[in-house]
Image (cartoon, rainbow, N blue to C red):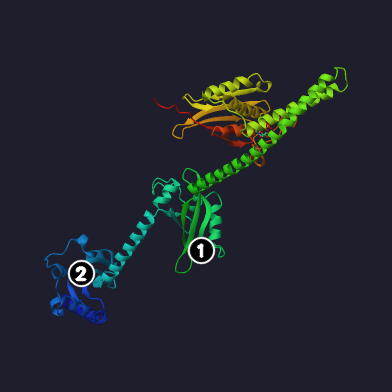
Amino acid sequence: MESTKTEMNEAVDNEELNWRVRVFDSLSYPTMILKPDYTLVSANQKFLELFDKTPEEIRGKKCHAFFYNKETPCQAEECPLVKVLQTRKGQTLPWRKKGGWEDRVFSPILDDQGEVAYIIESIRDVTRVKMLESELSGIKELISRVVHSSASPIVAADRQGNIQLMNRAARELLGVADVYERTIHNAEELYPPGKAKEIMTMLRDEKQGGKGKLSGVPTTVVSASGEEIPVEMSAAIIYDDDDKESATMAIYNDLREKLEIEKKLQEARKQLAQSEKMASLGQLAAGVAHEINNPLTGILMYASMILEQLGENNPQHQDVECIIEDVNRCKEIVKSLLVYSRNTDSQRHITEINELVEQSFRLTRDQKIFRNIHIEKQLSDEMMLINVDTNKLNQVIINLVINAADAMDGRGTLTVRTYRDKSARKVYLEISDTGCGIPEENLSRIFDPFFSSKPRDKSTGLGLSIAYGIVEEHEGHISVKHTDPEGTTFLIELPQYIPAEG
Ligand SMILES: Nc1ncnc2c1ncn2[C@@H]1O[C@H](COP(=O)(O)OP(=O)(O)OP(=O)(O)O)[C@@H](O)[C@H]1O
Ligand SMILES: [Mg+2]
């Protein structure tokens, strides 16, 4: 009875096997059928060709014997067939063959009870795919190396703005220590608030460099420490095959150095224009002063004679006194103009700059205007010698100090600072106040003779122009280092005197 049942089962098995064999015989992959007990049932034509076997040489063999010449099955954990039996799901075993690669694909054929009745093993040559994959990964590796070693900072983000790539130059620019310890995670954090959105709008605008492209746009990025860095940016949207936005990338060019150079160049141009203006004004002033000096001496002489002739009680006595007073004022102005135009003699002495500063402050000390001003001296301990006309330099310092006191309306802090730049052989003197500052529109005029914002009867507007003339005469330079409504700092630089050795 038992044996009849088995025979019947086998008949069914064989019938089923017949059509399965016909189907898989026509498959272009070398394929064979196994039983769960590792027995090879059949193999298709391709398989027989590949292994150069006849169906008889295959049938009934155990797979471990056929493939590995072994008497016992392979280790269960290494055997894909065992896995198929356990999981009832297909398994793939990558296989290195001579001159290439293949995938051995194991697929279960389940019986009515859902148990694995047979296993189809087909061999797929994946050499070409693997070669392409390795070529592609080689290209990917190359692109990645090119991007990472690029001297230009490059950042790429996905559609949500999450930063996916930040090359070394970008990390240096943004002060990000390590790729994995990034403090900047999203493109929004790369720019000042609202800027990332603005850039995306520009990128999508066809009129601005074409759709999805931007080139050489000046903007600002924010470093990990919050510093705003001016950059020039070229950016692009990366589209996928369906023309949908999949990522964005940007390349930056750090503009800090360029802007710094431009600023210095502008400063130098301004200085040049200023000194050209001062030189021609100086010539004019010298000419005028010279021409006026002689007639003034005449007026003064004749007015003094008239005054002597008029008695004290004469009603015109006071008028003539006014004439003399005004002529004297004019003579003072002429004298100042001559100083400004460097048309006066100089008496130079080698002096220590701190000593000169102390001297100038002693001369102003008793003036009423300094009563409520706190004076702070930050004088360098270093020995800083200068070769100057001390009287003229005193005049410069006093004028700066009085200007500072005027700007503070007699109340505030006046700081005087000295220092030097040893390698440049320069000595510096700074006078700062906490006054009202110099409005932008006046900055280019304050060194002009007769420019003043103070009441006419009080000032001539010659102070700074004289100071300018004196400092230039000493091969130095005077400038406004800083000014805003909180105060002003004037800077004088002079050549340091270095005694000859020996
Ligand atoms: N420390 C300062 N703070 C603000 N403004 C200043 C300062 N120093 C100079 N100025 C401006 O520059 C102008 C020119 O200064 P300058 O010393 O040449 O003339 P003045 O002080 O007006 O007149 P003078 O020096 O002849 O009495 C001033 O009137 C003032 O407007
Ligand atoms: Mg002045």
Q: Position of residue 253 (x, y in %)?
A: 47, 53
Q: Residue at x 48, y 61 (%)?
A: 236
Q: Earlier in the sequence, mark 1 or mark 2?
A: 2
Q: Are marks 1 and 2 in contact (CB under 8 Å)?
A: no
Badge 1 marks a residue whose secondary structure is loop
Image quarter of residue 401: top right
Please give left or right for residue 415 compared with residue 12 in the image: right
Taking depth in this image into account, of 215 and 66 the one nearest to the observer is 215
Note whether 75 is above or below 41 in the view shown. above
Q: Nearer the viewer, mark 1 or mark 2?
A: 1
Image quarter of residue 487: top right
Q: Position of residue 266 (x, y in %)?
A: 56, 46
Residue 452 in sight: no
Using a 10 Å C-alpha cutoff, classify the residue at mark 1 as few (fewer than 14 neighbours), some (14 to 19) or many (20 or more): many
Taking depth in this image into account, of 170 and 325 the one nearest to the observer is 325
Note whether 96 is above or below 357 in the view shown. below
Quadrant for the C terminus in the image? top left
The residue singled out by tag 2 in the image is 99
Taking depth in this image into account, of 201 and 424 the one nearest to the observer is 424
Note whether 327 is above or below 101 in the view shown. above
Q: Position of residue 44 (x, y in %)?
A: 21, 79
Badge 2 marks a residue whose secondary structure is loop
- Check residue 212 in the rendering and tell me which mark sits there, or answer none: 1
Amino acid type for the residue under numbered disc 1 = Gly
Q: Position of residue 122 (x, y in %)?
A: 24, 73
Please give left or right for residue 313 compared with residue 424 in the image: right
Query: Cβ(mark 1) to ligand 1 < 8 Å?
Result: no
Amino acid type for the residue under numbered disc 2 = Gly
Q: Residue at x 57, y 33 (%)?
A: 473
How far is the residue under mark 1 from the one under mark 2? Answer: 45 Å
Note whether 88 is above or below 298 in the view shown. below
- Check residue 3 in the rendering and tell me which mark sits there, or answer none: none
